[in-house]
Amino acid sequence: MTTDETLEAPATGLVKKGRSGALWQGLAFLTGKGLVALTTIILARLLAPREFGLVAMAMVFITFADAIGDAGVAQALIYLKRTPAMIRAAVAIALASGAFLAGASVAIAPLVASYFDEPRVVLLMRVLALVILVNAAGSVFEALLRANLQFSRWSIAVSIRAVVAGAVSIGLALAGIGAMSLVIGTLAGSLVYVGVLTLMLRSRPDVRFWRARRPELSAVVRYGIPVAAAVLLSRLIFDLDYVVVGSLGAVELGLYTLAFKLPELAIIQIFFVISSVTYPLYTRANADPERLRRGYLLSMRIQSLYGLAAGIGLAATAPLVVPIVLGRQWNDAVPAMVVLSLYAAIRSLSAGANDVYKALGRPALSVWISLARLTLLVPALIYGARWGIVGVATAQAVMAALFALLMQGVALRVLSLRWRSFLRAVLPAFLSAAAVGSTAWLTVRFLPGSDLLVLVVAIIAAGLACAIVAALTARDALDAVVPRLGRGRSRA
């Protein structure tokens, strides 16, 4: 059997495993994130921009702490051997880290409220601190499911979390408790998520953390801390804009939060879905450089194809999407949504680079790149704030474009790939995005009729344009996602 035939063998090909995982993750996304989107739309009509802004203020530090709540043990368990001793060590570190960060969140809540000049933030933030501990505890179970490629079980847990969080938030909002409805809903979803994860494991892991030994603790820490640092820096990069916008006021932060919500749900969350599948696959293929290179280029083609097309399309239709979906009280968020949609599209060009660094055992690369980006981003965001939320969004988009080039340059170097290989991989994405953008803009600009009718026609027309261009230029990507659409077999 040849090497290529081996790669295509049932149950061992990267594409087959990745497709299966992505399909299950896609199912979780469509159900989970679809429910999140529906919840957001309902809550946008029940709560004022100021209420969303207050929760966003409370979430600023919580988001950063939650990102590193498990001290990177989830990623470490995927990379390291998952022996009972290693699992015990991971549980011990996750619980200790989560408890420390939850306590720190409770302690500094008054300082955060003082910075934003919003006393109501204190209680919101202290309730949300519990989410950090709960998520840290569940990170080990989540990692075990991902490492064993049990994406279907994980998908069920994700969907259940979305249902619980949405139902609780909407119910409490209808009861009139305002911003706290979002907070309690988030906590309820996290608690149920961890409970379901434990039930989804085929065998009960050894969680007797008090029996953790120093060698395993050291191994988990050595890998996990650089990963956690990279995740924290990444979260600072992607969420520091909320800190800057929050200084402009709760209303402005509420508008900015909702302006970013749709691009995040429709585009950026897709990248996390793909990453949750590709990272374990890259890790399994790191001993076969050629296999890893082919898989990476195919992944970049798929992600950029979707990301650029969806981002450009959402930017072109934002003037209709906001009043129809969120309500006219959110019309001031339209300019920011246009820019943030473009920002989400740009991020598709750097998606996957960090997974390669980690899969090759070099997570420190992410740390150094993120430090450089953060150093430049802080003054850029502060300067952009002179022009309000649109200026902040523009600063994020510009920095994302610059560092997409740097991140891909490093990824291509460690993979021994040339730039022309990457450009060939993403060229269909630019062609498809151009077709989507021009079709959607012309439809919105010149088609007569009601706003809803124009929006529906624009989405259908842009989707058809994208499908035609993708079918002509990216058959391998279509084949990897839905085999029957392709003419040949994928070779990744």
Image (tube, grey):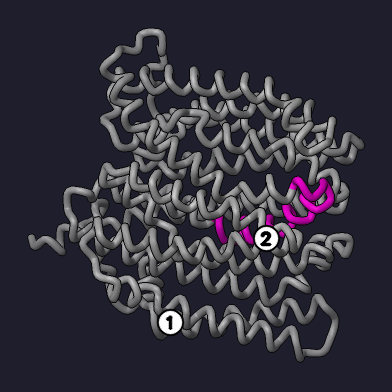
- Range drawn in magenta: 246-269
For the N terminus, give its image quadrant.
Answer: bottom left
Q: Nearer the viewer, residue 91 or 483?
A: 91
Q: Look at 58% across and 50% down and name the residue there.
A: 378
Whether residue 184 is visible here, answered yes or no, is: no
Q: Nearer the viewer, residue 112 or 167?
A: 112
Who's the residue at 47% across and 51% down the image?
24
Q: Secondary structure at mark 1?
A: helix
Please tell me the numbered disc located at residue 384: 2
Looking at the rendered image, the quarter that the C terminus falls into is: bottom left
Please name which of the two marks, 2 or 1, marks the residue nearer to the observer: 2
**Residue extending furthest toward the left:** 1
Q: Is residue 3 left or right of residue 338?
A: left
- As drawn, the label of residue 471 is 1
Residue 488, percent across and down? 28, 76
Whole-percent x, y for residue 250 in the image: 82, 46
Instruction: Decide if residue 397 is on the left or right side of residue 15.
Output: right
Query: Please, is residue 430 above or below residue 367 in the view?
Result: below
N-terminal label among 2 and 1: 2
In the rendered image of this protein, does residue 195 appear above or below residue 50? above
Q: Quadrant of residue 108?
A: top right
- Left/right of residue 434 with respect to residue 12 in the rendered view: right
Name the kind of residue labelled 1 in the image: Ala
Three-letter residue code for mark 2 = Gly
Q: Residue at x 24, y 56 (%)?
A: 414
Mark 2 packing: few (<14 Cα in 10 Å), some, or many (20+)? many
Q: Principal SS element in the magenta part? A: helix
